[in-house]
Image (tube, rainbow, N blue to C red):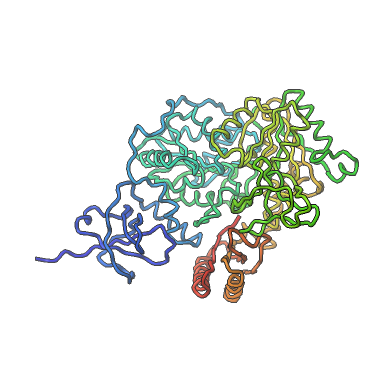
Amino acid sequence: MSLQKNIYAKVILPLKLRIDISYLVPEHLSPSIKRGCRVKVKFSGREYLAIVSSIDDNCGSYKGKVSEIIEIVDGFSALDEHFRFWEWLADYYMCTMGEVCRAASGNFPLVSVKASRVKKRVASVGGDFTLSMEQQRAKNEIEKSFKEQKPALLAGVTGSGKTEIYMSLSQEVVNKGGVVLYMVPEIALSRQLEERLGKVFGEKLVTFHSAMTPASRRDTAQRVADAGSGNGLLILGLRSSLFLPFSKLDLIIIDEEHDSSYKQSEPSPRYQGRDAAIVLAGIFKSNVLLGSATPSFESIYNSNSGRYRLVRLNERYHGAEHPEVEILDIIKERKAGRLKGLFSAIVLKEIENRLLLNEQVLIFRNRRSYSPMVQCEECGYIPLCSHCNTSLSYHKNKKELCCHYCDFHIPFNLVCSNCGKGSLTEKGSGTEMVAEKIAEIFPDAVVERFDAETTGKKSEEKRMLKDFASGKIDILVGTQMISKGFDFKGLSLVVIINADSMLAIDDFRANERAYQLLEQLSGRAGRGEKRGKIIVQSSLGSHPVYSSFQEGDKRLYDQLKERQEFGYPPFVRMIRLTVRGGDKLRVNEASNVLEQKLNLLKGAETSGPFIPVVDRIRGEFISHFWIKLPRSGNSLAKRWISTIAIEVEKKISGVTVVPDVDPQ
């Protein structure tokens, strides 16, 4: 009688581990165990859900104690396509498979969801849109690109009706039983689109983002997994939707593809959702459509090199005119005595005229809170966060000082805690102050504020958007959350204050980002029959970003030549290495060691360490290194960088070295 041969399962734990770990498969589980299934295991005294990556008759290179798998957990199994995607993410973004699978694990339900739990919608009622001749031409070009198996980049001016093209293409796929992933960068945009898409796709629409309840996320994952059997489905989701359990995927639409919100900053994997979507599409042989009024330099580069097909849409929907642009020189306004607090008298007069015509106004200030900081008039003291080297922002409604990095907050006391004599006075303005001041100037107008603080509840965000769309709100003061994709027929005037803060950033992308934001904001005005207007209050009126925006000549994209000349993305790959730890001396020591090792890296341009302006966040001191690598053939260099990062962590305890590929 022969003995039963041992079977081992190599698993991926949702941890940052750089070793392979195998478990013994109990005899009663051996008929059911397979690659991709989830199992319960014990590691370092704790139980975890792990994903089986392979089955073998030996435990490979694992030298530790081989424990038994506790049980197999019912639920969706990972497919080969998922493993290929995860492996690419781990390799490209220089992290472990455990970190990638931790990000994916929440999107793979443990058990099947009963049909009664799936959110019910009205049946699909068909398209409520008709494409113009210009839109139909663009759609035909996009379909031609799909036939060539090439991603299409739809560069459509704001208000040109890109969404109608997205819906038309999606409906054709869904009606044939296909699966479409429609990606947007932010939750606020997905919530508005959900209502619009629901009227067309009905029960064939599902949504997915982090603000949904765990039960709702499981419901969506269930629908996505079932869609592989020929049930047409449209998934409206953010970057995390790339980790859903697809078994079929026919079309990926990446709306506002330029948006930096597609980049994951914390925790690892620090992936770029747009770029990762292109790879996922390649794995599933899906068509890809990227869309933006202001395409990223990376996508323009890919179009110029022939990787994407560029499709332009230069006419606004129903012939609406591009908004009038006025750049107001605040320095001149102040000298002429026309500056009334935060606003030029010209701006206030324009707002008054719009209100008299029952039109709406959007005031943009990309800074929430009442003021970014407060300072003592007597001794100059500025209250700082006790965990981060940054000033505390003043939130007047909450009567507190708050850190926007770690959410540390303390009650606001007018008397200076440093000298006890002077009083704390606000410095600068945020959306809360802007809303208060404009309401004082126009007391009969309905003024609301749209930022992360006021839209914390989904119901309040939805109420505010609905009220502004229906004309119940006269003036809306908002941050960048309100700049993308929203369609407000009554909005005719957009005012941008403190516009220069968009340019005062030590980042090679600052001009690109500022131009994109200006264009996005201009697209919110004049979407009805009347021409809109956008006024920019600036102290740098002659800046090339403003002149390019005002003249609408896209000259900003000429900076691609400068990027190439000075060796910046998209012509090179960039990696930011961050050294962080609670002890400043150890961080400095680790940075010195890392600098010496990076100097040995051939074929790369390295610089650093650099100490950022905010050099301590959440109790950890930080320093940065920048590494430029060739666009291709850099895998060995990246592995070498990962190796020396690990060596530095081992040599100097209490320090972490974090790589961020293609940082934003």
Q: Relative to 350, does residue 434 appear above or below in the rendering?
A: below
Considering the image in quadrants, where does the N terminus appear? Answer: bottom left
Foreground residue among 162 and 99: 99
The picture places residue 27, in percent across and down from the top left corner, at 19, 59
Q: Relative to 581, does residue 393 appear above or below in the rendering?
A: above
Q: Residue furthest top?
A: 357
The picture places residue 153, in percent across and down from the top left corner, at 58, 44
Foreground residue among 199 and 350: 350
Q: Residue furthest right?
A: 336
Query: In the rendered image, is residue 25 in sight?
Result: yes
Considering the image in quadrants, where does the C terminus appear? Answer: bottom right
- Count of labels in the image: 0
Left or right, residue 68 beside residue 441: left
Location of residue 362 (image quadrant)? top right
Location of residue 213 (image quadrant)? top left
Left or right, residue 560 beside residue 602: right
Q: Relative to 104, does residue 446 appear above or below in the rendering?
A: above
Foreground residue among 317 and 110: 110
The picture places residue 598, in percent across and down from the top left corner, at 58, 73
Query: In the rendered image, is residue 599 in sight?
Result: no
The picture places residue 322, in percent across and down from the top left corner, at 72, 34
Foreground residue among 181 and 160: 181
Q: Residue furthest left?
A: 1
